Image (cartoon, rainbow, N blue to C red):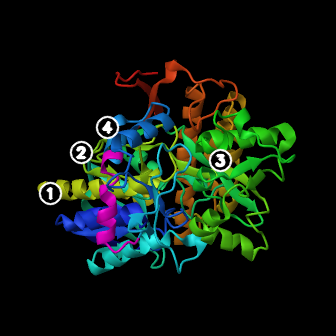
Amino acid sequence: MVIKKLVTDVLVVGGGSTGLIAALEAEKNGADVTIICKQKAGRSGNTIVSGSAFSVVVPEEGNPDSEEIYFNDLIRSGKGINQKELTRTLAFNSGKTIEWLEDYGMEFFKTNNEYVKRQPPGHSHPRSVPTIWDGYSYLARGLSFMKPLSESVIKRNIRVMEQTVVAHLLTTNGKIAGAIAIDINESEFIVISCKSIILANGGAGGMFSHNNNTVGITGDSYALAYEAGAVLKDMEFVQFYPTQMIKPLKMPASNPLFGDGAVLRNKDKELFIHRYVEGGDKAATRDKMAQAIFQEVERGYGVEGGVYFDCSGIPKEVLESKYSHFCNQLKKKGVDPQKDMVIVSPTTHYFLGGVKINTNCESSIPGLYAAGEAATGTHGANRLSGSSIADTVVFGKIAGESAAEYSAVNQHAKINSQDLSNKLERLKVNSKGEESLADKKELVRSVMWRSASVVREESILREGLKQLYEVESILDKIAVRNYKEIVSFQELANMITVGKLTIKGALERKESRGSHWRRDYPDQSEDYLGNFEYSKSSDGDIINYRPLDGLLINN
């Protein structure tokens, strides 16, 4: 076993937008920073496949929008269980992020020297501001957001380790001491001594067989934090993107299109959203739209597993000016969006649960911070379109600054040698294993989609949980032959850990709220106007309920 050592002040786990922003801010505040990324920094994470538009209160004279209105929209979308101090932090700091990003070289669409603003469903005012993505593929236009950040990281000489995966966090006396990483290319382990760690390695969309996430999003941030002893929260909430195009090609049909007149139709070409959501297509938030499509397909009115997406109601000049890239992608397939309809279906999109943090992005473990999709609380039971990228900037900056401040006043904790040895022992090959690693990962993904996706009910949830325990029971029989498979095996273990918590939380929440929809409990209940918190003990998973602004209630 080849083991290298590394010493740094702040370790940033993740090379997506949150990680890059956190690293830049930590370095700016005087810390020695190291970024560790499973893929390639600046070309990984879900921002790349996002629409690269983020929802902010644009600081322009005469703008009728306000931070308070944005805050209320976020609370309304989150069904009232948002961690309000985090939601307020996002809303009231969102507008400041534009200037910060422009300082790093990011460019935004403007008309007559004013930012172009779109109005996705659920927003009271137009506030979705897109970057200029000319020169980038429509399916990877988020690179227009990522490239200036990654170039800035290079200019600052921030240490970046790619194709490297953090497998375990190390704590001493309840505080962060370091981490164990695996360098896939060099086939070696790295023991990292650090003062603070920022988890910025995303969500768990890859835990489901149907998802629109990039490769490697397997719940690592949650599993790392949970194993180390951090409190997680709201793990039952998973957002499903309602309109992932499945024909004539696979790509998202952007939510702002509904604000300009796009509608959904069933197999008989009938408008149907109004039967499920007051206000119809334009008013439907992502959770309600996904559930409406699912039910319409379930009723037998679907089209090849989805429904029709119709842009003919959007004025031609609006469609061709505001959504030119979208139109060009369709025209390459011989589809005229002004006349022809495409087929869309829900898919796993964003994890709303995660590491519980405060407004400084601190977790329950001193020295451990989380931001972006790794953290939870801001969006409650459902996230508004465009708010995730705003989240990465606002809280990425806060996490970087907080971690740097912590590292400035704390010494490196001595790594517990026995804990290190035990964790290294778990990261080993098993050439005699007889079970297929790839097969078991695919099984977990299919179990999660079948039991815990858009529609949930007790019997299906319990069957899914049983199947996850069955896979967990044979982990020691799975063939693991090299360092790459050690990483893949770790992903499987993380998917099982996070999957079990997601299902257990879904069983505990006996109501339907936001993205969590129980067929057997279809109504929202005041009994669940609060949050479930998850912690690990020697006796297993502990799930406690905390009413809003109330005391923790033990099960």
Query: Going from the N terminus, do you reach mark 2 or mark 3 first?
Result: 2
Quarter that holds the N terminus: bottom left
Query: Going from the N terminus, do you reach mark 4 or mark 1 first?
Result: 4
Q: Are the two marked residues, 1 and 2, in contact with CB atoms closer than 8 angstroms?
A: no
Disc 3 packing (10 Å; few <14; some 14–19; many ≥20):
some
Q: In this figure, which residue is indicated by the disc labeled 3?
A: 471
* Residue at the far left in the pictured view: 409
- Judged from the image, the secondary structure of the residue bearing numbered disc 3 is helix
Residue 318 in magenta stretch: no
Q: In this figure, which residue is indicated by the disc labeled 4?
A: 85
**Disc 4 versus disc 1: nearer the observer:** 4
Question: Which residue is at the front of the view, 415 or 157?
Answer: 157
Image quadrant in which you'd find residue 28 = bottom left
Q: In this figure, which residue is indicated by the disc labeled 1?
A: 411
Query: Going from the N terminus, do you reach mark 1 or mark 2 first?
Result: 2
Question: Which residue is at the front of the view, 197 or 134?
Answer: 134
The residue segment tinted magenta is 91-107
Query: x, y percentage for residue 379?
Result: 45, 42
Q: Are the two marked residues, 4 and 2, in contact with CB atoms closer than 8 angstroms?
A: no
**Does residue 111 lie above or below 293 as drawn?**
below
User: How far separated are the C-alphas under marks 1 and 2?
Assistant: 13 Å
